[in-house]
Image (tube, rainbow, N blue to C red):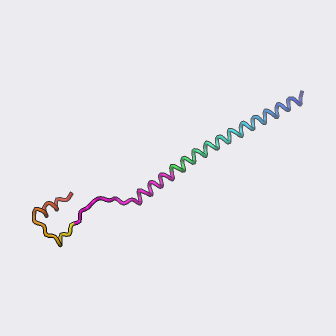
Amino acid sequence: MSSSIETNLLKSIETYLTDRNNRLKEEIYLQMIYFQKKLTRRCRQSQTSSLTEQMIGVSPQVILDVLHHDFNSAELEYLSRGK
């Protein structure tokens, strides 16, 4: 009888340890997924922010060479209005 009890006890301990081991593996796997997503998000944000830092704003500006072109007073007044 005691041999049977010892066998059942050992099987119970083995089952517990196997179950606990599987749960720990699953928790580690889920944490790895969480941190991978977090790192991926940070990489994308840093790439996006570095791209925006490298971008140069462009707006069309008209440059007139007033030294070589004569404008009448109406044209000069129109040009001096600004935007």
Q: Residue furthest top?
A: 1
Q: Quadrant location of the C terminus?
A: bottom left
Q: Residue furthest bottom?
A: 68
Q: Residue at x 21, y 67 (%)?
A: 64
**Corner quadrant of residue 65:** bottom left
Work out whether residue 68 or residue 28 is closer to the camera in this orientation and state it: 68
Q: Residue at x 17, y 72 (%)?
A: 68
Q: Is residue 6 above or below residue 69?
A: above
Q: Residue at x 10, y 64 (%)?
A: 73
Work out whether residue 74 or residue 69 is closer to the camera in this orientation and state it: 69
- Does residue 44 belong to the magenta stretch? yes
**Residue 28 position in % (x across, y down):** 64, 44
Q: Is residue 5 above or below residue 23?
A: above
- Does residue 5 belong to the magenta stretch? no
Left or right placement of residue 6 versus residue 68 in this view: right
**Residue 60 position in % (x across, y down):** 27, 60
**Residue 82 position in % (x across, y down):** 19, 59
Left or right placement of residue 4 versus residue 66 in this view: right
Q: Is residue 36 above or below residue 58?
A: above
Q: Quadrant location of the N terminus?
A: top right
Left or right placement of residue 20 versus residue 65 in this view: right
**Corner quadrant of residue 10:** top right
Left or right placement of residue 41 versus residue 29 in this view: left
Q: Residue at x 54, y 46 (%)?
A: 37
Q: Residue furthest left?
A: 73
**Corner quadrant of residue 30:** top right
Numbered marks: total: 0
**Residue 53 position in % (x across, y down):** 41, 58
Q: Is residue 19 above or below residue 80?
A: above
The magenta segment:
42-63
